[in-house]
Amino acid sequence: MSVDFKEFFGPGNDITPTRVEPNLQLILENFMAGIRQRQIGFLPRSSGGRLWWYGFAPTPRQRRETLAILDSWIGPTFSDLPRHRGALNPADPFDAALAKAPVKPLRFEVLPRPTAGSKAGGHARGQVRDALLVLSRLLNGRPPSEFDAPRTTVEVLDDLGHAIAARDRAVALACLRELEATADLDQSNLAFLRLRLFAGLEDWKAVLGDRDLDHVLAMRRPLSVTQVIQQAVYARWFARHDAAGEEDELLAAVAELPAAFRPLFSGTPTTSRAQAVVEFLIAVDANADEGTLSRLLDEAGTIEPGLPAHLRNVLHLHREQTLQPTALPEPPVPLEQSGVPSESPLERATGMMARGELQAAIDLVLTLEPGLHAAYLLLTCARDLQSPQQAALALEYISTHHLRGLIDGAGARLRDDLSWLEQFTQDGPHLDWRTWLDALDGDQGGAALATGPEVTDTWTSLSSGALTVWLQDASDEVLGKLGEIGGQFMAAHRDIFTEDGAAELSERVLAGLALSGKNSAGVRVQTQALLDYLLSANPASAVFASALEWIELIVSANISAVTTTWAIDILQTATATSAAATSPAAAAFFYKITNTVRPFKTALDPTDLEAIKLVAGELGLRAPEDLLAESVQDADPGAPYRHLQGSKVVLYSLTESATTRAAQVLRILVPKIDVETSAEHDGSSKLAAQAANADVFVVVTASAKHAATDFITAKRGTRPVVLVNSRGSSAILRELAEG
């Protein structure tokens, strides 16, 4: 909120702050200081013997709230508020300049106007001034609500998990900023967390552009972080050629790979195509031994049937390209006669570790005489490999040969590695998502429940069948615990909830969120996402009705003056489906949501009110007149979108409820706009035509495949693509507002 005070107290205003009485001068200074700090403040204007006050608020929501409060504090007794509702006068040049502000100030005249021989006008002016001073102090001195209160690191991490699961970039980045500001995490752990976040959003460009990437590449890092970087390298340099079977181009791409990414060879078993391709190409380029290449090819066969043959072709091409004609070889000289000292087994193991052959290095060291060097190799390889079996073998070797004393007397790094190894192999159940779920229903799993993302990233996700059985059998109490601390769990299992026919799973998790009674940004974005998934799966009427009942509870726990637009988004999403047209539950849901937002009706913006009217009309219901009456007299809900008039706009999302509602609102607000919605898969001729011909193309990245976004961007050429990083129709309209 930027106000030019010199201009405000210039032409058209007879008041000069430095020439008024000291008491009023102090009041004006306090008001101006508050406005500069993005607080609510009031400034007076006098002209021709009349007095107006202008109220400045930093956001449209606070402007609407202030107008409603002024009705009670000033009202018809001392102002023209009932008649003009705080509107600026477009015919007044003074007001015309203020009307250009992003948030227009409120204006009202102090009544009655002073007349000769009457003291009423002077009394009114004093009363209004004192009332505004007290009002501003109360508004700006309010304590933060529970929605803004400081939170623990665990709470923020849980919200971060929900945001990643819902692919909501705005909330995820807000959580990250909160952790950077308040959490007791060092720079390295924050960098690891940031890279995991970008991976969850499938933003591989952000991974490769991270400010701390060089530092991360040069240090020991968790295996999950290495795999994130491998995926980003694959997306940037290899994915296009790999998908097209362009084996020559793959070799050319690995030759162009920057040197900083060559150490990405992890030596751990590969579990994805991206990891297998990256590790194999790096090994081929480094002329790795046959044992390494054979292991990688064997692992590739467990990932995709045709992948080993594809990689063998790359290897053959590399060997053909690097083969140089030579003279006939001379008979080999025995090693002992060559003058070159033979390599010891420990040196061979060290070389294996340097090449990333961690498991082979461990296997060799276990056969050798014990010593500090052997302990160093075992600890380093076991920690990087993060295999429970290999870690147990390394610890047994160290214990059997009594190497702990040597390690304790060595450097801090070896002691730290030994401490990690002992914790990693400690007695008790091996931690994974199954033991985590079991811990929700008992007292034995406190350690599992408190586990952070640096550990859970290494856990294998449950199968769809196992998760379905667990959710169906879970009690209300256990579901409530899942709703309370399930953010990381949802991030790890997001793909299961997006499968066809998974509506019942989404309904069960919505039940958990409702039973937890939790209010947070993560719960809100997760609710929106789960509702999208549920509706996309064509739920049975009973599942749909049950989901709406749970969502009502979630909205009740999460409603406030700053979440009303989210609540209306939920209403729009739930009713933008054929299920709503035939379900009595939809009408009940409409009235319950509008009743829930009623105490915060001044926070509803004009597009929220248009949405309420739209939904009411579709359901054949009467829109609540008291809510619609909150529309400010001079507000034009279509003004922010007027630049789209006459344009062809395409809204793209794989979940169509939000784009359908946004398109309907735009058609109401903007005459002569041509709006289409699209949920085409990438590569379709229709999507190509839409991307090529639209004046404005919007992609809801939270509900779009990464490949589709790339396809659309390529078809757009130099014309921009509007990326919406949150769910809901309001997010789309926000990005389109004012161009």
Image (spheres, rainbow, N blue to C red):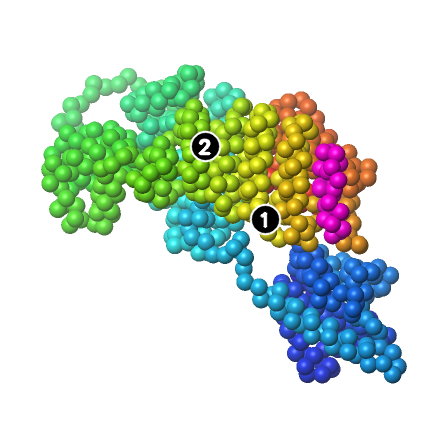
- Residue pointed to by mark 2: 493
Q: Quadrant of residue 254 in the image?
A: top left
Q: Secondary structure at mark 1?
A: loop
Secondary structure mostly seen in magenta is helix
Residue name at image x 72 percent, y 49 percent: 627
Whether residue 322 appears in magenta in the rendering, the answer is: no
Q: Position of residue 118 (x, y in %)?
A: 85, 81
Question: Of the numbered discs in the image, which one, if any, rests on residue 559?
Answer: 1
Residue name at image x 35 percent, y 44 percent: 450
Determine the CA span between mark 1 and mark 2.
27 Å
The disc labelled 1 sits on which kind of residue?
A: Ile
Depth check, front residue: 275 or 565: 565
Residue 260, placed above or below residue 12? above
| Residue segment shown in magenta | 609-631
| Other-residue count near label 2 (Cα within 10 Å), few / some / many at <14 / 14–19 / ≥20 | some
Depth check, front residue: 712 or 701: 701
Let me know if residue 498 appears in the view.
yes
| Other-residue count near label 1 (Cα within 10 Å), few / some / many at <14 / 14–19 / ≥20 | many
Q: Earlier in the sequence, mark 1 or mark 2?
A: 2
The disc labelled 2 sits on which kind of residue?
A: His
Do the residues under discs 1 and 2 have CB atoms within 8 angstroms? no
